[in-house]
Amino acid sequence: MSNTMTEVDLKTLILPNQTVEQGGINIAKGIAERTVWDAHATVNATHAVISAPDEEAARIKSIDQIADIKRHLKPADVLLDFGAGYGRVAQYLLPNLPLRGYIAVDSSREMLSLFRERYIRSDEEQRTPLLLLNADIHTVPLVDNAADAVVVCAVFLHNHKDVVHKSMQEIKRILKPGGTLLVYSSYPRAATFMGLQGLFYQIVLNLLGKPFKNGPVRYYSKREVTALHSGFAELDIIPVGFTIVPKTLIFLPGPIEKIYRVGFSNPLNSFLEKICPKSYHYLFAAWYDVVAKR
């Protein structure tokens, strides 16, 4: 392929006869009509894709992540945004780094509609050809070796681990040999008080017959993260964040939870982070990020 692609060129990366196009969005034939994220997007798209309760903290985290993504990309790359949502990565990335092509996959049609509405208003983003693909992340109708790089940002944590395992198999199939996988804010650490809450909540869901419920956060050990990325030529698992006191108590009513988070857990964790020697911060990391080479 040439260094310049078009939307038509990107469509050749879709598996034949697996999608239908509606309103500029390519919809996988097997996807459910609507998902939980459509409802969230209708209310507030930002809340539907950013896991941090503190929106300012989430904004700062986004800036850091975009800077890191840029370090791993080249203008000649086709990037697959896995669980793209309303295009949070694209809106910060593409104005500063036009790419050969951008493929946005999400299970929410509503999210992708918001992405498209913003994209067509942005001359800077339109320098990069865009393909919007409404599909489940564990069954993505793209050909093998379609992408030079894949970014996953705050997506896996909301899905059952079986779904994440299948999604990772899809990523390995779609990512070119030598390509780069970047995973951010998707593997919260199990060895934290939040992790213990999450384990208890998952047990409750299992007892209620809802083990695959989409939305609740799942927590990971480093061994689980390593196993998920088996088969990659290079793997760097990076401890990120800092937490000792649970940042939230998931069973508190909304207003009381906000008081706890804003008035107690956030300032206390911030204080503890400042007094803890940096050489020990990895022991209290909130999650793992991943940089892997196919």
Image (cartoon, rainbow, N blue to C red):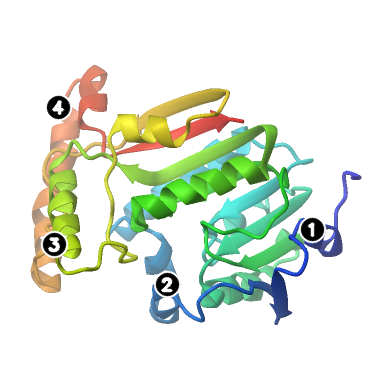
**Residue that label 3 marks:** 204
Which is in the foreground here, disc 4 or disc 2?
2
Circle 2 crowding by C-alpha within 10 Å: few under 14, some 14–19, many from 20: many
What kind of residue is marked 3? Val
Q: Between residues 18 and 38, which one lies in front from this camera angle?
A: 18
Which is in the foreground here, disc 2 or disc 3?
3
Which label number is shown at residue 275? Answer: 4
Q: How far apart, in angstroms, are the residues tagged by discs 1 and 4?
A: 50 Å
Q: Secondary structure at mark 2?
A: helix
- Point out the tag, 3 or 1, that comes first from the N-terminus: 1
Q: Position of residue 245 (x, y in %)?
A: 11, 43
Q: Position of residue 293 (x, y in %)?
A: 59, 29
**Residue that label 2 marks:** 37
- Point out the tag, 3 or 4, that comes first from the N-terminus: 3
- Point out the tag, 4 or 2, that comes first from the N-terminus: 2
Which label number is shown at residue 10? Answer: 1
What kind of residue is marked 4? Ile
Q: How far apart, in angstroms, are the residues tagged by discs 2 and 3?
A: 22 Å
Q: Between residues 31 and 23, which one lies in front from this camera angle?
A: 31
Residue lying at 18% horizontally and 36% vertically, measured from the top left: 191
